[in-house]
Image (cartoon, grey):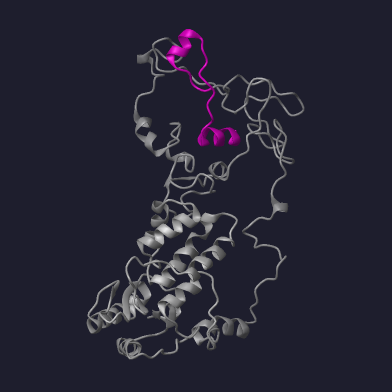
Amino acid sequence: MTLSEQTRLAAKEIVARYPRGRSALGPMLHLVQSEEGYVSPEGIAFCAEALGLSKAEVGAVATFYTMYKRRPTGEYLVSVCTNTLCDVLGGAEIYQTLSESLGVGHDETTPDGQITLEHAECLAACDYAPVVTVNYEFFDQQTPESASSLVAELQAGGRPMPTRGAPLCTFREISRQLAGFIDEREGALDAGPALEPTLVGNRLAVQRGETAPPYGEPVPLDRPTDGDRPAPTQAGTAPAGTAPAGTAPAGTAPAGTAPAGTAPAPAAAGSASGEREGGPVATPQTEAEKSAEAGTARYGGPPGEASSGGGEGGDGVETSASDPASSPGSGVTHESDAGKADEPTSTSPAQGGPGTVGSDSVAPTSDSPPSTAADAATGEAEPERRPTNRARKTRREG
């Protein structure tokens, strides 16, 4: 079928609406459908040529969206919602009744070309379930009997008034409207009043004196504003009012540090406190690390959340960081390490004792992490490692 000159002029008008031609593809497919009753191979070729696209690109869009029909569609497209709520309230029964009376199945058209039947996943009108649409106009709260009467009237040449929305038009006419052209029929923009399911929320709000917050009001407390966010700090410094990472709160002197008022001794490279040679490096803590220090950390969820197991009663697996007493002295920081806690340590006399070549590890100090036997023999320090939650918590408590 050759597209009319009117459609070709309308296509140029559509393309002119967009800064990029390919953005007009959706309306163009509706335009083609408004003339042919479906998106034909000729229509795909026309869109591809007009927009500088390949036929494969146009066909990919036309086959993805269900509102683009790939076979001739009847004068009226009857869609029955069979999604959850409509289905529970009788949507499947309505569809089955219409299918049997019309003698067609999903996406099939009656021999007279009047009715195309389809079941739809959702028609966005759950408060009016079960719902049927005709050419995308709503007929709400249907029953098998009312839906059968609706279809019978359409077959007899009538155009029943939708429950709400504009008066019925043909499938080709609604396709042209979806392409972005105004329906110029008299009374085409008329619509009935909103029904109770639509207005019940407003009525309850008036009765309770509830109003939506005006623009410019503060956001809820559970969402911080920009003014509540901490100011950015310079590299190597801690936020105002907080102690640098790896140090104890004011008024306490953790083990291995100098008394208050004196300069702390430089830490060894790779120390457990997270300091590097040349001075401390401030490492901002995540919410998960803060929860680990507070003893509420759980394993198994997003790392940025304070408690990845969902707080008390969550589904996460507790680690030894959240319950240090569960594995005293074992240093277990992950449930997968629990089995290792029962194995003999390398510091037993039978294995040569700590610090001897041939033992699995050397005795850890308060300033440096354990080193392997190879490191002890060669004198090479192990690369710096980020302290575990347990080590961080133990240091804080010390």
Quarter of the image for the C terminus: give it: top right
Direction from residue 114 to residue 200 in the image, left or right: right
Q: Residue at x 42, y 84 (%)?
A: 140
Magenta region: which residues?
369-398
Q: Is residue 47 above or below residue 108?
A: above
Tell me where residue 266 appears, x and y as whole percent.
Answer: 67, 20
* Any part of residue 311 in sight: no
Q: Is residue 290 found inside the magenta-colored segment of the image? A: no
Q: Is residue 388 above or below residue 306?
A: above
In the image shown, does 15 or 5 lie closer to the viewer?
A: 5
In the image shown, does 219 or 243 lie closer to the viewer?
A: 219
Q: Residue at x 58, y 85 (%)?
A: 203
Direction from residue 364 to residue 158 in the image, left or right: left
Direction from residue 218 to residue 86 in the image, left or right: left
Tell me where residue 189 appears, x and y as whole percent.
Answer: 55, 84
Direction from residue 216 to residue 324 in the image, left or right: left
Q: Is residue 393 found inside the magenta-colored segment of the image? A: yes
Q: Residue furthest right?
A: 261
Quarter of the image for the N terminus: give it: bottom left
In the image shown, does 150 or 366 lie closer to the viewer?
A: 150
In the image shown, does 292 or 103 lie closer to the viewer?
A: 103
Q: Is residue 230 above or below residue 20?
A: above
Q: Residue at x 47, y 11 (%)?
A: 376
Tell me where residue 119 appears, x and y as whole percent.
Answer: 32, 73
